[in-house]
Amino acid sequence: MHVIKDPIHKDITISNFEMSIIDTNEMQRLRNIKQLGPTSLVYPSAVHTRFEHSIGVMHIAEKIAQAIKLNNQTTKELKIAALMHDIGHLPYSHINRIENMNLKATKKDHMDIGIDKIKTNYSSLLEKHNINTNNVCNLIKGKDPIGAILSSGIDIDKMDYLVRDAYFTGTAYGTIDLSRLISTATYNKKTFGFLSKGIKNVESVVISRYLMFSAVYQHDVIEIAMEMLGRSVQNLCDNKILNLNDLKNMDDADLITLIRRNKEKLGILIDQRKILKSINNIHENELDNKTKENCIKLSKNPTLLKETEKLIAKELKLKNDEFLIRIRSFPKSIENTQIYENNNFVELKSISPLTKTLEKESKQEWKIMLISKENKKSLGLKAKKLFLKNI
C-alpha cells in the first residue's frame, strides 16, 4: 500500500495494483496536462494537472462506494474507471476549437480516445487482476446505473474538480461539504442519487459550478487565450506541421514547443501574455432561434469558423490572425440528478427552484466574443455587423 499526500483530500491510500496503473505512460502523461489549460494567465497558481485530479476522483469513488455499500468487485471497477477517466484528454484540455477539429477528423472525443487506450493498453493488466475492461469502459461512459456516480449532474468528477480548481485559483466558489454530500449518497440497484435531507449540499455543488463558470472557466481573458491557442493549432494542422492523430499522445509541453519552434504568432503572444481584446459581444437575447442555431453550428465547424474569421478580418483591414470569433458552448441543462424523497427518486430540478434559476441564468450569460488586437468601438461595431451578415 502507498499513501499520497493531497491538498484537497489529505491522505489518499493507493493499492499496489492502482499504483501499477498510475505508473504507466498514459497516466504519467497527465502530469503534463494542466487541468485548466491557460487559466494560469489570470490565476497564476492554477497549474494543477489532470494527474492529481484523477487520483482525487478515485479517492472519492472509494468513499462513495463505502457510503452506498457497493461490493468489493464493483468498488474496484469504479475506482479504476475514476482513475482512468481522463486519459484521453488532448493537450490544454477542453479547448473547443481543438476538440472540434479532432472530432471532425477522427470521429472521436476525449472519452472515446480514452476508452480506446484502455482497451488497447490496459486490458491484459486489468483482466490479470479480475477486472472486466468493458465494465470499466461502461462506467466511464456513464452507461451503467453505477456510471452515474462518475458521469451525471452531481458526480465524483465534479466533486473533485470544483474544490480543486477553487483551491488552486484562490477563489472561494468551490466550497463544498464533501463528507456530508458523500454521506447522503444513496443507490437502490437501479438509480444513484442523494437523500432529500442532503439537498442543500447538492444545491451547493450546483451553485459552486455556476460561480466557477462565471469567475474562472468563462473569464474573458481565459476564453480569448483558449481561442488564440486553438487557432494556433489549427494553423499548424492546415500547414501540415501537425497531424491531429498525434495530439492524443502529446502533452502541453509538446504542443507549446511545437508552436514556439514554428513561430506560430498567436501562440507566441500567449507565451508573452499579450492577449488579444474582446472588441464586442453578441448576447443570447440579441439573436433569434435560427441565428443562434447557425452560431452553434459554426462553432462546431472549425474550417468554416476560420474562413469566416478571415473574411471579416479582410473587411476590417486586419491580418488573418488579428480577428477571432469565440462562440461559447451553449450551456447544457443540469444533467440528470436524482433525489430520494418519500420512497421515490425525483429529478433535482423538479424540487429545486434554485437549480432552475441558475440554469436559466447560465443560458442568459451565453455569448459570442469578437476578438482583435485593439478594442476600438468603431472596429467592434463594424465587426458585429459583419458577423451577423455572414452567419
Image (tube, grey):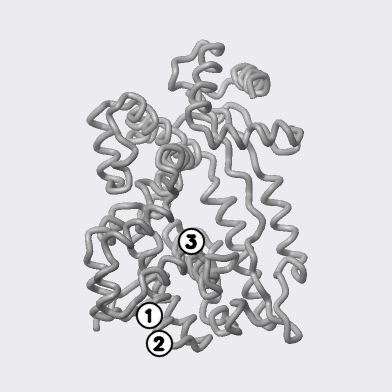
Mark 3 Cα within 10 Å, few/some/many (few <14, many 20+)? some
Question: Could you tell me if the residues under marks 2 and 1 are in contact, i.e. CB atoms within 8 Å?
Answer: yes
Image: 238 above or below 109: above
Q: From this viewpoint, is residue 35 visible?
A: yes
Q: Is 91 placed above or below 372 here?
A: below
Q: Which mark is residue 72?
A: 2
The Cα–Cα distance between marks 2 and 3, rounded to whole angstroms, is 32 Å
Placement of the C terminus among the 4 image quadrants: top right
Q: Is residue 307 above or below residue 93?
A: above
What amino acid type should be assigned to the residue bearing mark 3?
Answer: Ala
The front one of 373 and 91 is 91
Tell me the amino acid under the disc marked 2: Asn
Report helix, strand or loop for mark 3.
helix
Decide if residue 107 is on the left or right side of residue 129. Answer: right
- Closest to the observer, 269 or 388: 388
Whichever of callouts 2 and 3 sits on the residue coming sooner in the sequence is 2
Label 1 to label 3: alpha-carbon separation: 29 Å
Residue type for callout 1: Lys
Query: Mark on residue 131?
Result: none
Q: Do the residues under discs 2 and 3 have CB atoms within 8 angstroms?
A: no
Residue 290 picture quarter = top right
Q: Identify the disc placed on residue 76.
A: 1
- Where does the image place residue 288, in percent across and percent down from the top left? 76, 33
Q: Is residue 48 visible?
A: no
**In what element is the residue under mark 1?**
helix
Q: Label 3, on which residue?
A: 166
Relative depth, front residue between 214 and 352: 352
Q: Secondary structure at mark 2?
A: helix
What residue appears at the point 29 percent right and 40 percent down from the top-left corner? Answer: 255
